[in-house]
Amino acid sequence: MSDKETTLWKDSPSQVDNLGTFILCGFTFWLIIPVFIALYKFLQTKCHSYELTTERLKITKGILSKREDMLELYRVKDISILKPFFLRIFKCANLVLNTSDKSTPIIIIPAIPEPEKVREMLRTHVETMRDRKGVREVDL
């Protein structure tokens, strides 16, 4: 068995998540400030990325200053998919991870396409990492 960590999935949230803001800013563009708000929201979403590897989930966010968080897959306790009506129109959904990580107990991956595929990849590799590390989840 190879211990090399490989990337399974890498994506950023869909701009569909900002559609309401873009529409509102489009109607009030003549005020100039909404143009900057729309640009900021676009860049904020564009610079937010998720990378799922065989061992961990890497979350990177920030436009000028970057923050990178990592979640070891064996810490994932539960995976849910939230499909709000608006996102379902665009075939997107939110993936919610409940974890045993102290700094990030709940991680929401917003507006991603094919969430079922990502959930199954996550589930498979969570179990693999738990077996490899000999970790079992116990709730008290």
Image (cartoon, rainbow, N blue to C red):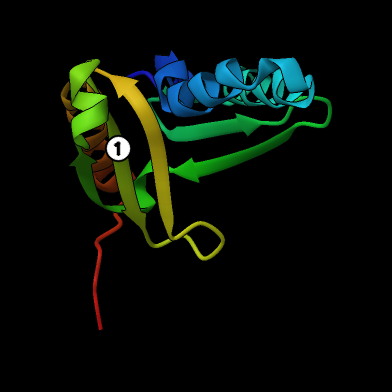
Q: Secondary structure at mark 1?
A: strand
Q: In this rendered view, identify the residue nearer to me: 30 or 6.
A: 30
Q: Residue at x 59, y 26 (%)?
A: 48
Q: Where residue 1 sits in the image (x, y, percent)?
A: 30, 21
Left or right: where 66 falls relative to 2: right
Residue under numbered circle 1: 95
Q: Quadrant of residue 123?
A: top left
**Residue 129 in sight in this render:** no
Q: Residue at x 24, y 45 (%)?
A: 131
- Looking at the image, which residue sits at the far right? 64
Question: How many marks on residues?
Answer: 1
- Give above or below for 42 relative to 59: above
Quadrant assignment for the C terminus: bottom left
Q: Residues within 10 Å of mark 1 (few under 14, many from 20)?
A: many
- Looking at the image, which residue sits at the far bottom? 140
Q: Where residue 55 sits in the image (x, y, percent)?
A: 42, 33
- Give above or below for 114 relative to 136: above
Q: Quadrant of residue 6?
A: top left
Q: Quadrant of residue 69?
A: top right
Q: Where residue 95 sits in the image (x, y, percent)?
A: 29, 37
**Residue 30 in sight in this render:** yes
